[in-house]
Image (spheres, grey):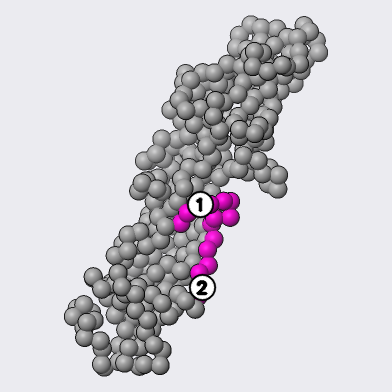
Amino acid sequence: MATYIFPRENNKYRVRVFKLPVSSPLNKTDQDQSDFNYEVLLPETINNVIGFKLIDWSLPRDIVPSFWPRTTKLAGANKLDFRLINTDISPLPADFVVTYPTKFYAYQNYKDPTRDYVQTTVTLMNNAIAANPTWKNKVNIDVVPITTLGTLFLVSTLDPTLPFGSLTYLTLLFQSGPNSAESVFYQMGWDTPSDPVSSTAVYVLPPAVTALQSPGAVQLRGANYLDVFVKESNQSPMQRIFFKDEAYTTNRLNITESIYRFEVDQNEPPRKIEKLHIKLRYEEDVDPGDFVSGPILFPQYLTFHFFTIDESVSDMPSWLQQNLSY
């Protein structure tokens, strides 16, 4: 696609630029539409469009969450089933389940513990244990940061009334748990689902402590980039947004350059635009669908520039006349 620079001082080739901000919470024609598939009605029809582009975007970091609930098109991956066994506490094992919030997590995040994977895992698991009267205040689970960025569990038996050195064993029920279809084995650093069990054989541990470590690093980023498609444009995708770090969600191009340099759609220019049909896709064209409980809502803010031939100009460039006829 060729790039043309239209001189501002030459009225024969005068191009008008329309700037259109789009807010998914405010401008969707139907608020029940997912923020991955929605329609926007323009405030007014734009005619003689020869090209348009996405110049700014602001997306919530959670638009690629580390842990997904089940959707209409994606299997969920936000459940952790685990089991505790200590016959000194109970003759029967106790099973627990935790559900991770739909957020993007860093391995560690000191500024925001609610986005810290290590701390969140500790909190969720110990809260589940505390809700069981038989096990409350008798067992504690720590997740220890390690250089390989894996998941290392330390399981401590706390009750001083138990026999000295009484051991509690942790089993992660990735394979056999009731929520195995939505388990977080991959995010936690396991390549395949299994039911790993803590032991005293891996590390030199203090009395009454067992340990369990993932074989690999955690996988907290669900995609490396996001593609923005707009049905009315021939650019496919219109924009690819790469996720390089935690601040990937906002971009602002050089406004001056974006106005005076642009790509003309010579193939089949949009001509007349009344609506925009926007869809977001993860790499490999993955459509997340909708949450089973309702639409996926990740508020986003996009800004488009539309480039048009001014209808008041009588001498229109000949190469545009045919494509702009209705």
- The picture places residue 156, in percent across and down from the top left corner, at 72, 19
In the foreground, 174 or 12: 12
Amino acid residing under circle 1 = Phe
**Badge 1 local density, few (<14 within 10 Å), some, or many (20+)?**
some
- The picture places residue 54, in percent across and down from the top left corner, at 42, 67
Q: Is residue 283 visible?
A: yes
**Badge 2 local density, few (<14 within 10 Å), some, or many (20+)?**
few
- The picture places residue 53, in percent across and down from the top left corner, at 39, 69
Instruction: Name the quarter where the C terminus is drawn.
Output: bottom left
- The numbered mark, 2 or 1, whose residue comes first in the sequence reads 1
On the rendered structure, is 158 left or right of 13?
right
Q: Which residues are magenta?
A: 241-255
Determine which residue is flagged by label 1: 243
Determine which residue is flagged by label 2: 254
Amino acid residing under circle 2 = Asn
Q: Image quadrant of residue 212? A: top right
Disc ID at residue 126: none
Instruction: Name the quarter where the N terminus is drawn.
Output: bottom left
Residue, x 23% and y 70% (percent of image)? 267
State yes or no: residue 249 in magenta: yes
- The picture places residue 199, in percent across and down from the top left corner, at 63, 14
* Prevailing secondary structure class for the magenta stretch in the rendered image: loop
On the rendered structure, is 303 left or right of 119?
left
On the rendered structure, is 98 left or right of 210?
left
Q: Is residue 160 above or below residue 50?
A: above
In the foreground, 317 or 4: 4
